[in-house]
Amino acid sequence: QGPRLTKAMVQLPLEKLTPLYQMRHLQMRQARRRLLAILNYFRSIERRVTLDSRGLAFSSVALPSKVPADLASAAARPADADAQTTAEEAHRNLSGVDPVMGHKEAMDAEAVQSRDDQYSIDADGVVRVRDAAGCLVVYDSALEDLTRVNSEMLQIGTYYLQTYPDDRSVPDRVTILLDLYEHEATYYEALKHTVDVLFEAYEHCFCPTEQARLGQELITSIAQRPLVDLTKPYFAESYRGHTTALQLQGTLLRDVITGQMLEERMYRNTTVVRNHGIPVLDRYGFPEEVYQPATHDELLGGCQPYTCVPGGLP
């Protein structure tokens, strides 16, 4: 059953109950922060998959050129057009409708900006999302997802409060809400473990068909939600079951990817050994030998061009 307060606990003085509920409030805030960070990370992945599938063109509006005559006319534009010009310049490399500059200007360009987000983990283990410019971002859709999850948690908590079976005590509402936040955050952390493996396979897959299939598998996995068995005396058992299943699934997918990488390296080294007798000048186009890594982190240091097996697993 869920947490409950006996009559002796209810009659505790306020100076003893206040620190307890303040500590639980801080724990809920931290769990809410972890939850929002993962939802924001998932939205960033969905953005990446959408851009890869729909192309690079955001609009068909012609972007300003770098011809001196055009630059002079742009300087005479009113001040209210500066914001639009800045946005156009920021997304100059994202437009795939028409070439923005000639090949000579493109070769002379200093750098090419990336359109994809970057990810990092802070000291508390919370994932942070940065855009192509390096700024921390939180997507509006992630906040909407958090509101939706909060609504579902309140419905689950309200149901168990209304069906509380013991008349000799009262349910601890704060602890129930804390349990909901903790189980939701733990569930999404386990889901992130599975999504990370699929996203790694998605990034290393060069076949457009297989990459599209992996992208759909990513979106489907992100949309998963735990199914709570309302016949159970408490919701914790349902959350633990789904979390354990996701952890096992992520571990299985990680082992499949690691095994496939090792097989690819073994095949490459075997090809090198078979062609070792060919003169060096005649071995143009044959792969070079790669060492066998001892850990998965070392394994990720190499280039694995075709890692799409996990998308086909049931």
Image: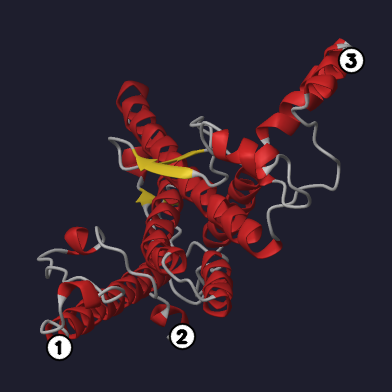
Q: Mark 2 points at which residue?
A: 312
Of label 1 and label 3, which has the lower sequence position? 3
Q: Quadrant of residue 81?
A: top right
Can you say which quadrant of the picture contains the C terminus?
A: bottom left
Amino acid type, label 3? Arg
Q: Name the residue under label 1.
A: 274
Of label 2 and label 3, which has the lower sequence position? 3
Question: CB atoms at circles 1 and 3 under 8 Å apart?
Answer: no
For the image, the number of numbered tags is 3
Q: Would residue 1 be seen by someone viewing this image from the given angle?
A: no
Nearest the viewer among 15 and 108 is 108
Disc 1 packing (10 Å; few <14; some 14–19; many ≥20): few
CA gap between label 1 and label 2 equals 32 Å
Disc 3 packing (10 Å; few <14; some 14–19; many ≥20): few
> What residue sits 60% from the left and 46% below the top?
142
CA gap between label 1 and label 3 equals 67 Å
Secondary element at tag 1: helix
In the rendered image, the vertical position of residue 60 relative to residue 21, given as above or below = below
